Image (cartoon, helix red, strand yellow):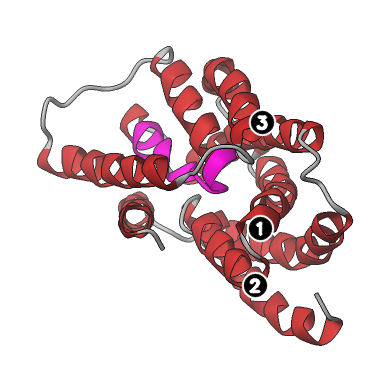
Amino acid sequence: MPICEFLPILPLFAVLGWLSAVGGVGGGVLMLLALTWMVGLEVAVPTLALAQLSSNGCRVWLNRTAVRARLVGWHAVGAVPFALAGGLLLAHMPPGPLQRILGGCLIATILWRRLRLFPVRPGERWFVAVGGFTGLASSMLGAAGPIAAPFFLAYGLVGEAYIGTEAAASVVVHLSKVAAYGTADLLSVEVLVLAAGLMPAILGGSWVGKKTVQRMSNRLFVVVIEIGVLFAGVGFLIGL
């Protein structure tokens, strides 16, 4: 991508980095849409994995005292093998059907939470299945953080505990994805250069987002998360 086309998008990705840090979801989906429009899906997905690895790593560090390590561990049990499998399948399997299923599931989880149908607090071992679905969808679609969001909320995480734990779980997924993409020869020079250029803008937005979260009430925080999940669900369902 020519430098004259690259520089104007940096402020956009700084804003999306802020959005990811505030809500934990939504920013990654919008980053994927923007990158796909600019460079195509095959370049956008591995580029976003590298960029989000740095972004989520920053969020883990900024919220490190609130991370729930046991939840991250259970999530990783399912996420790692399915993220590796999804990364290897990316070049050989159309993501369309999975994208629509994911969109429907995201919308259903918000309705479940709001209508309080069969209210239940998920246990830690639930996150093995959540991690598996998240890892597979993230590897094949590029951005699937919203899958886990309703479950982290239902578990009772808000504020820094939610942001830090969700980010730590995402780091595990992104590391697995990057390993799979490398094996599948998807980490081209273009991908590496583009990701390196986007990282400073995303990290700057993440730092500002950390300050924003500290000023938000728990109720507003939950509403922001649910709006992000709903937006992502509609986007996946209609094929944005």
Which tag, 2 or 1, sits closer to the chain's start?
2
Crowd class of label 3 (few under 14; some 14 to 19; many from 20; radius 10 Å): many
- Identify the residue at the far top of this view: 125
Residue denoted by label 1 = 44
Image side of residue 176 versus residue 129, left or right: right
Which tag, 2 or 3, sits closer to the chain's start?
2
Q: Do the CB atoms of the residues marked 2 and 3 lie less than 8 Å apart?
A: no
Which residue is rendered at x = 84% and y = 60% of the image? 190
Image side of residue 178 versus residue 125, left or right: right
**Residues under labels 2 and 3: Cα distance?**
23 Å
**Residues under labels 2 and 1: Cα distance?**
8 Å
Give the residue type at disc 3.
Leu
Which residue occupies the foreground of this view, 206 or 138? Answer: 138
Disc 3 is placed on an element classified as: helix
Residue denoted by label 2 = 38
Which residue occupies the foreground of this view, 106 or 17? Answer: 106
Name the quadrant containing residue 40: bottom right
Which residue is rendered at x = 77% and y = 45% of the image? 186
Disc 1 is placed on an element classified as: helix
Up/down of 12 relative to 111, above or below? below
Residue denoted by label 3 = 88
Name the quadrant containing residue 193: bottom right
Name the quadrant containing residue 101: top left
In the image, which residues are magenta? 139-153
Q: Do the CB atoms of the residues marked 2 and 1 lie less than 8 Å apart?
A: yes
- Residue 52 appearing in the image: yes
Which tag, 1 or 3, sits closer to the chain's start?
1
Which residue occupies the foreground of this view, 171 or 4? Answer: 4
